[in-house]
Amino acid sequence: DTGVSQDPRHKITKRGQNVTFRCDPISEHNRLYWYRQTLGQGPEFLTYFQNEAQLEKSRLLSDRFSAERPKGSFSTLEIQRTEQGDSAMYLCASSLGSGRVTDTQYFGPGTRLTVL
Amino acid sequence: DQQVKQNSPSLSVQEGRISILNCDYTNSMFDYFLWYKKYPAEGPTFLISISSIKDKNEDGRFTVFLNKSAKHLSLHIVPSQPGDSAVYFCAAKDQGAQKLVFGQGTRLTINP
């Protein structure tokens, strides 16, 4: 199965530390998305890439957050100077990027971040 | 503002019966709607979708109904099975946008 994969699955860090997550999309998918999910809520959009270009960023993505997708394949999401409020599940999704309305996003298993 | 709302945090249904999950939205520019299913410690799994040009889409035991005038969609699962126990999220996409807007989720429990 070549679904979306994310690494690590769990990350515990101390406040103030930097963390980096990786996402590998489904091969041939041109679009890659990052979402964040907190307890009792649905996923909230953070940012998305079309190939290597970052085309949209949410207001949720503060200056401490940066995402990259070099070469249009895998993506990384870095959080600098983590805060306890950053504790959440970080979800990555990918889609074909067909340009059609029905471009379905498929999610990875997520990275659960706990900031102590 | 919550543009997509799932007003029932939880639902309990007997095995073999029909499960009906509801979702309301406020943004009339939404033109594509999806349902995802999520087990604990896993990412959301795509279940079924519907375009705003349709009012019904069916896939096996799952049917999604869209009522544009009421800005309401529902997911019907029949017959319900124990493996359907999960959290179900409704999501919507705006015309020309790529991001999905999710509801808060409904936890479905199927009782044997």
Image (cartoon, rainbow, N blue to C red):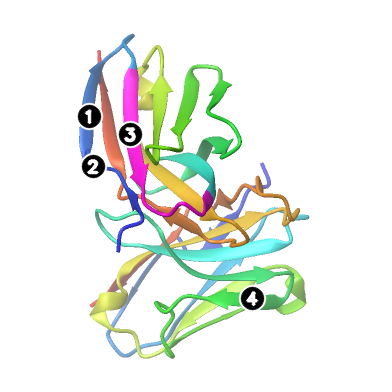
Q: Find residue B11 and name its label.
A: 1
Q: Main secondary structure of the magenta part?
A: strand
**Secondary structure beneath disc 2?**
loop
Residue B89, given in percent of the width and then of the height, sits at 39, 43
Q: In the rendered image, which residue does mark 2 sit on? A: B7
Which residue bears the numbered disc 4?
A55
Do the residues bearing badges 4 and 2 touch, measured as CB atoms within 8 Å?
no
Q: Which residue is mark 3?
A: B22
Q: Could you say where residue A83 lies in the image, as x and y percent from the top left?
A: 28, 83
Labels 2 and 3 positioned on one and the same chain:
yes
Q: Are marks 1 and 3 on the same chain?
A: yes
Residue type marked 1: Leu
The chain that hosts pointer 4 is A
Q: Amino acid at mark 4?
A: Leu
| Mark 3 surroundings: few (<14), some (14-19) or many (≥20) residues within 10 A | many
Check if mark 1's residue and mark 3's residue have beta carbons within 8 Å. no
Q: For this rendering, which residue is in front, B74 or B43?
A: B74
Q: Using the image, determine if residue A79 lies above or below residue B47.
A: below
The residue depicted at 72 percent of the width and 53 percent of the height is A96
Which quadrant of the view contains residue B53? top right
Secondary structure at badge 4 equals strand
* Region of the chain picked out in magenta, as a range: B19-30
Report the mark closest to the observer, 1 or 2: 2
Tell me the CA gap for discs 2 and 3: 8 Å
Distance of label 1 from label 3 (alpha carbons): 10 Å
Q: Residue at x 28, y 39 (%)?
A: B106
- Mark 2–mark 3 CB contact (< 8 Å): yes
